[in-house]
């Protein structure tokens, strides 16, 4: 049994302290509930900037924030570092890697992980980016790739190290391809002058007919134009089929010889067993009503990427983005307080404030409900919004400084390969 001090307050257990869990926990301060947060990491991660860690633009610590520091001054709050393995709704308890825990209310906010659409070889061989650890692993692999290329003499032998492939033309695929292209343009010629830069190719492979299909046609076209400007080879209407022996097979019958395939193409909800099978929908998302209550349960709620709520405007559920998670969490905090005082609950309605993505310096896309803009101004808006969304003043300052430094010097200073596994191998 996980040791949590007894309390006169009812207990709400929040699984996951990502965008949704963090917002909810903060908003429940003074709610009269005992709050127990369980996460498998002891820090909150800012996923939108993972790609900058992966491409050596930012340190992992500047986009992560320790949970214990956030909740230092919260009364009747408890954090447990554990992975939830199973829910037992009938007994109002859950099993975790640290033991058993009871709850009065349960909130599922465990987000989503990678989906490889059943392609085992891609799951084994490609590099995803769904956690700080994966982003760091990607950085190691990327840098090691160029180091390894130097060991060979012929273009043929070097080819697989110099073909970098990004799978998935959503915002993350776009951002990481752009960052790689800028690395090729500004950093690699200085760091690796022995490599023939013309042989380094960044491929972006997308199964549908356009990039970021959630954007308007015009903005998708702009995204493609920006990538072309940076020299990224964009392959639309092309799906990946298999990946073995460093060969990526594509649906048009061609292959790309590559040692590094970045996976940004698919996600699926992080499944925790125990709920009725009828509660689970497509992509492992959990069906919830407009109060985020899991269908079939009175005291279990789900938020953010893991929740599948249908609104008239979103018949297949909301997009799996941070603003949905944050807005749902804010409303649920109010609704839990209403539950305690017997008031009627307020239904959720998503306010879509727009979408943005960046491709590189002075190249970004901002699409608001009534306006769209591209280029330098959009890039500054993108930077401002992301900077303001980061948890922690120190992190904001460090990121701002890093960005400013890169802007004026066209350089980054974080190209270190730090692999704890290497140490183990040596011992
Ligand atoms: C690379 C990348 C870039 C993105 N860029 C953007 C962007 O630019 N704009 C945008 O709006 N959205 C973006 N997103 C999407 C956005 O990050 C998600 O929509 C958002 O994080 C969802 O919030 P959440 O709270 O539902 O889940 P998450 O933020 O994923 O949090 C889930 C938490 O649950 C924990 N957890 C998972 N399973 C367990 C378990 N079994 N036991 C205990 N803890 C568990 C995890 O450690 C994590 O802390 C991006 C996502 C990625 C991966």
Image: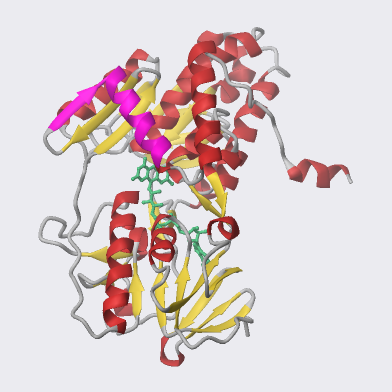
Residue 327 image offset from top left, x and y in percent? 28, 57
The quarter of the displayed image where residue 310 is located = bottom left
In the shown orientation, is residue 220 left or right of residue 7? left
**Is residue 101 visible in this depiction of the protein?**
yes
Residue 259 image offset from top left, x and y in percent? 58, 31
The quarter of the displayed image where residue 205 is located = top left
In the rendered image of this protein, does residue 230 appear above or below residue 66? Answer: above
Foreground of the two, 421 or 160: 421
In the rendered image of this protein, does residue 24 appear above or below residue 377? Answer: below
In the shown orientation, is residue 275 left or right of residue 162? left
Foreground of the two, 425 or 34: 34
In the rendered image of this protein, does residue 350 appear above or below residue 277? Answer: above
Q: Please give the name of the residue rendered at 50% of the width and 12% of the height, measured from the top-left corner.
A: 408
In the rendered image of this protein, does residue 326 appear above or below residue 386? Answer: below
Per the rendered image, the range of residues in magenta is 371-388
Foreground of the two, 346 or 316: 346
Can residue 317 be found in the magenta stretch? no
The kind of secondary structure the magenta stretch mainly shows is: helix
The quarter of the displayed image where residue 78 is located = bottom right
Query: Could you tell me which quadrant the N terminus lies in?
Result: bottom right
Residue 36 image offset from top left, x and y in percent? 51, 73
């Amino acid at each position: 049994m996980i040791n949590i001090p007894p309390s006169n307050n009812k207990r709400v257990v929040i699984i996951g302290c990502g965008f949704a869990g963090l917002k909810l926990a903060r908003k429940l301060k003074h709610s009269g509930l005992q709050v127990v947060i369980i996460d498998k990491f002891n820090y909150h991660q800012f996923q939108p900037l993972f790609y900058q860690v992966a491409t050596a633009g930012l340190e992992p610590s500047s986009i992560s924030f320790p949970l214990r520091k956030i909740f230092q001054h919260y009364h009747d709050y408890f954090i447990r570092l554990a992975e939830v393995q199973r829910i037992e709704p009938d007994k109002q308890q859950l099993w975790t890697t640290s033991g058993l825990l009871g709850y009065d209310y349960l909130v599922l906010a465990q987000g989503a992980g990678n989906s490889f659409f059943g392609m085992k070889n891609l799951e084994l061989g490609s590099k995803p980016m769904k956690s700080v650890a994966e982003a760091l692993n990607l950085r190691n692999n990327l840098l090691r790739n160029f180091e390894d290329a130097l060991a060979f003499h012929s273009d043929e032998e070097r080819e697989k190290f110099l073909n970098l492939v990004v799978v998935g033309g959503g915002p993350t695929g776009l951002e990481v391809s752009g960052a790689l292209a800028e690395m090729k343009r500004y950093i690699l010629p200085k760091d690796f002058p022995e490599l023939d830069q013309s042989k380094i190719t960044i491929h972006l492979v997308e199964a549908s007919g356009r990039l970021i299909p959630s954007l308007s046609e015009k903005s998708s076209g702009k995204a493609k134009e920006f990538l072309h400007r940076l020299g990224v080879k964009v392959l639309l209407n092309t799906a990946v089929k298999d990946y073995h022996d460093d060969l990526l097979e594509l649906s048009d019958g061609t292959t790309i010889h590559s040692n590094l395939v970045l996976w940004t193409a698919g996600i699926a909800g992080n499944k925790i067993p125990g709920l009725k099978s009828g509660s689970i929908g497509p992509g492992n998302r959990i069906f919830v009503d407009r109060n985020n209550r899991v269908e079939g349960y009175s005291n279990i709620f789900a938020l953010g990427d893991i929740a599948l709520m249908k609104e008239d405007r979103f018949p297949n559920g909301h997009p799996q983005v941070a603003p949905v998670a944050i807005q749902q969490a804010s409303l649920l905090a109010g609704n839990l307080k209403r539950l305690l005082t017997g008031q009627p609950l307020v239904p959720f309605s998503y306010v879509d404030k727009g979408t943005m993505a960046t491709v590189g310096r002075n190249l970004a896309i901002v699409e608001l409900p009534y306006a769209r803009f591209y280029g330098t101004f959009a890039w500054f808006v993108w930077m401002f919004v992301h900077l303001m969304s980061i948890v922690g003043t120190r992190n904001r300052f460090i990121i701002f400084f890093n960005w400013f430094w890169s802007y004026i010097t066209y350089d980054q200073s974080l190209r270190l390969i730090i692999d704890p596994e290497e140490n183990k191998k040596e011992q």
